[in-house]
Image: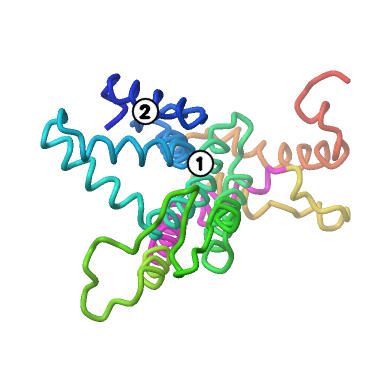
Amino acid sequence: MYYYSPKKRRELTEISELLNEKVAHFSGLKSTRWLPSRLRCLNAVEKNYTPTVVHMENMAGGSDIKSEDAAKAKGVVQEMKTEKFVRFLHFMLDYSTILSKCSTDFQHDNLNITRTNQLVESTTSRVLSLKTKPGEYQKTLGTKFTVNEDGSICYCGTQLTKSQRPARRGEGTDKDTLGAEIQKIIDNTVKYMDSRFKNLCEKPLSCFKVFDPSTLPCPREDLANYGDEEVDYLVTHFASLLDEEEKEKIPQEWMDLKMWLAEHRGSKSEMIGVPK
């Protein structure tokens, strides 16, 4: 609604100035790096909440507004002024922050397969934690919500209502349905990540973990045979790309590499070939 309309953005800015608030830019969702762009959009909705509500109310009741725009604005502001919307917005901010960080970390040049698996596991665990405890954005609701004498709730000065959608048979309160929706989002996300990255724990990709210096054992006896099985598997798997001489040399080269890595353990500058 705002991204493609300079007029609406100008009106929103004017309202923000009247309310002594700084408007955040409503950026569009990008087809590439869409997770960070979605997080920016969610942050803009949260920061621009009050000016946006006022603007949508003005549009919904404006006599000089097209009927189509007025109807759309009315629907938007009715949804924005529900407690469910505000709570779900803050959940999505926590949820998208976790996934956006994972997306950004995946773009690092020095990310290896071992770290990738750790990153996926860490991200999955952080998403799962939102089932049992609120994230940082959800925690702020305690200071942003005020409860009136009649039990109704205000958010940043805006009186909130219950959901405008009629409840289906068997449904509970807004809080119950929101909780069920959040649980479903989390479960589906974890299920997708487990399916999408399961090959990281399967051969041949899992064999590459032996090349991570942080996994090298310390005792010489353990180091002597460490990774031999994985390297043998990789040689067999990529046999069509290797000649006989290379296959014969790999076991000794692997032993030499292990000893060199163990000797330079903890010396980051030497590990990456940078002079001290």
Q: Is residue 264 left or right of residue 34?
A: right
Task: Tell me the magenta residue range.
Answer: 184-212
Instruction: Residue at 53% x, 45% y: name it.
Output: 97
Q: Residue 59: horizontal and vertical position, in percent?
A: 24, 35
Label whose residue precedes the other's in the sequence (1 or 2): 2
Q: Residue 195: horizontal and vertical position, in percent?
A: 41, 58
Instruction: Residue at 59% x, 48% y: name it.
Output: 119
Q: Which mark is residue 12?
A: 2
Question: Total label count?
Answer: 2
Q: Residues within 10 Å of mark 1 (few under 14, many from 20)?
A: many
| Viewer-side label of 1, 2 | 2
Closer to us: 211 or 26: 26
Assign a secondary structure to mark 1.
helix
Closer to us: 193 or 5: 5
Q: Are marks 1 and 2 in contact (CB under 8 Å)?
A: no
Q: Residue 132: horizontal and vertical position, in percent?
A: 56, 69
Can residue 264 be found in the magenta stretch? no
Q: Residue 147: horizontal and vertical position, in percent?
A: 51, 63
Q: What amino acid is at disc 1?
A: Ser
Closer to us: 263 or 92: 92
Assign a secondary structure to mark 2.
helix
Q: Residue furthest left?
A: 67
Closer to us: 216 or 4: 4
Q: Quadrant of the N terminus?
A: top left
Q: Which residue is mark 1?
A: 100
Q: Picture quarter containing residue 267? A: top right
Q: What amino acid is at disc 2?
A: Leu
